[in-house]
Amino acid sequence: MATWIDVLANLLLGAGALLAVMGAIGVLRMPDFFTRTHAGSVTETGGMLLIMSGLLLLAPDLAVAVRLLLIVVFLLFTSPTAVHALAYSAVRDGLKPQLVDGSGSSP
């Protein structure tokens, strides 16, 4: 029989996977570059945190847990930095965000 730690770990892994899939759908459905990068980066970071939390609960020893924490720290610094660099490059190249009027439709 599964312990409560196994159940919690599986719930975290499932929630992280679901969030990652929702982010992928958001990337496909969003109208312009900036909203796509936002949808992808926010859900990727959240999904990573949930998945890594589930993996930390299942870690067999301290060495594996430390490695997972180092991966989390690395990703928390590099993912937002990479998305910022992409958005900054797009702005520098002259790409403008798609504006939406108050009715919810594009101009």
Image (cartoon, rainbow, N blue to C red):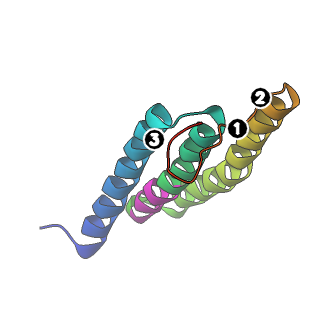
* Within-10-Å neighbours for mark 2: few <14, some 14–19, many 20+: some
User: Which numbered disc, 3 or 2, marks the residue that appears first in the sequence?
Assistant: 3
Residue 27 located within the stretch drawn in magenta: no
Residue at mark 2? 95
User: In the rendered structure, are the residues bearing label 1 and label 2 in contact, judged by CB atoms less than 8 Å apart?
Assistant: yes
Q: Which residue is mark 1?
A: 97
Quadrant where the N terminus is found in the figure: bottom left
Position of residue 47 measured from the top left corner of the image (x, y, whole percent): 47, 52
- The residue identified by callout 3 is 26
Task: Report, in whole angstroms, how far the alpha carbon at label 1 lies from the one at label 3.
Answer: 17 Å
Of the residues shown, which amino acid type is indicated by label 3? Answer: Gly
Image quadrant in which the C terminus is located: top right
| Alpha carbon separation for disc pair 1 and 2 | 7 Å
Instruction: Find residue 39 and report its image quarter.
Output: top right
Q: Nearer the viewer, mark 3 or mark 2?
A: 2
Residue at figure coordinates x 63%, y 32% from the top left? 33
